[in-house]
Image (tube, helix red, strand yellow):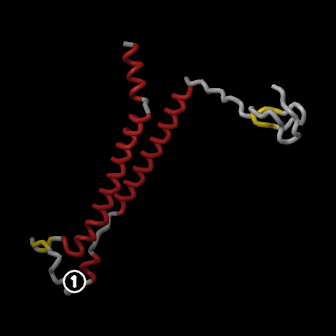
Amino acid sequence: MKKFLQEFKEFALKGNVMDLAIGVIIGGAFSAIVTALTDSFINPLINSIGGAEIAGMIRLPWVDYSGMTLEEISALSLNYGAFITAIINFLIIALILFILVKAMNKVMSIGKKKEEEEPTEKECPYCKMMIAIGATRCPHCTSEIKE
């Protein structure tokens, strides 16, 4: 059972699985923004131009709108509150996911030891300037390095 849980932990916390989960969640939140934009702005504009039903008949794009007055257009209702709510919800979800991923990365890095880097430079014993590790002469004082 212990081995099973360890394998599940490794699978669930892999980068690819986390990236996919975050992508699905962000996609769902962005879908809500697109739906709110469509329902709140685009559909009412289309309906005011020619998609609304009038007396049970659907307006068609080739119908003459020369008789349409400003009062008919001013009846247009844009529900921007739903759109703003969808944007705020998206930002909150993105912030929570950012904090979650940051915490997951912190937890994953706790058990890992930092690898020590091999030095690429050494100090010249004569002039005390830093030189390449494989150098046989110092480029600063031209002394021969014996090591």
The spot of residue 94 in percent (x, y) is 44, 46
Task: Single out the residue that lies furthest toward the left.
Answer: 56
Residue ID at (87%, 39%): 142
Quadrant of the image containing the C terminus: top right
Residue ID at (84%, 33%): 124
The spot of residue 24 in percent (x, y) is 35, 43
Decide if residue 37 is on the left or right side of residue 67.
right
Report which residue position mark 1 lands on. 68
The spot of residue 131 in percent (x, y) is 79, 37
Near-viewer residue (60 or 145): 145
Decide if residue 50 is on the left or right side of residue 40.
left
The spot of residue 111 in percent (x, y) is 55, 23
Near-viewer residue (146 or 40): 146
Near-viewer residue (140 or 44): 140
Name the secondary structure under disc 1: loop
Please, what is the three-letter code of the amino acid marked with disc 1?
Answer: Met
